[in-house]
Amino acid sequence: MTTTVSLDTTGMRLRLNGVRISYGDRAVIDRLDLDVAPGEILVLVGKSGCGKSTVLRALAGLRTPQGGTVLADDAIVTGPSADRALVFQDDALLPWRTVRQNIELPLRLRGLPRGKRKER
């Protein structure tokens, strides 16, 4: 079932073309084509382990596909970028960051200067 809702069209176009992602010998995503228009809301539904989080990680630039391309506004996604973010399902800390850096990360991603982050 597809439901379309008209929304603000600001944002970016996200596209996966023939994406293949494997963990070892196990293909989790195979030849996935997906086009998300600016302002569109996308919901990925499926059982645990079917590849939902893997798709989101690829869109965020946190997982590189073995085949196909991931595009953000027609530019190939080669890694994380300030214009895309992924919110994990569970509360998570980034182990390579200090406690302060983990706490300040959302403020940094919003573009708040370092001095203002420390004040908050």
Image: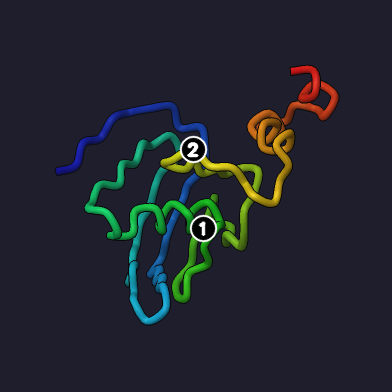
- The quadrant of the image that shows the C terminus is top right
Name the residue tied to disc 1.
71
Q: Is residue 53 above or below residue 106?
A: below
Q: Disc 2 designates what residue? A: 91
Label 2 to label 1: alpha-carbon separation:
27 Å
Quarter in which the N terminus is drawn: top left
Q: Position of residue 7 (x, y in %)?
A: 38, 27
Whether residue 23 appears in this view of the structure is yes
Q: Quadrant of residue 109?
A: top right
Callout 1: few (<14), some (14-19), or many (20+) C-alpha neighbours within 10 Å?
A: some
Q: Residue at x 67, y 37 (%)?
A: 102
- The residue depicted at 41 percent of the width and 65 percent of the height is 17
- Relative horizontal placement of residue 29, taking residue 57 as reference (left or right): left
Residue 79: image quadrant is: bottom right
Camera sees residue 31 = no
In percent of width and height, residue 36 lies at 39, 47
Q: Nearer the viewer, residue 94 or 32?
A: 94
Residue 49 relative to residue 64: left or right: left
- Position above or below: 60 against 114: below
Q: Of tags 2 and 1, which is closer to the observer?
A: 2
Name which residue lies at 63% across and 32% down: 106
Q: Locate residue 4 relative to residue 106 in the image: left or right.
A: left
Q: Which amino acid is tagged 1?
A: Leu
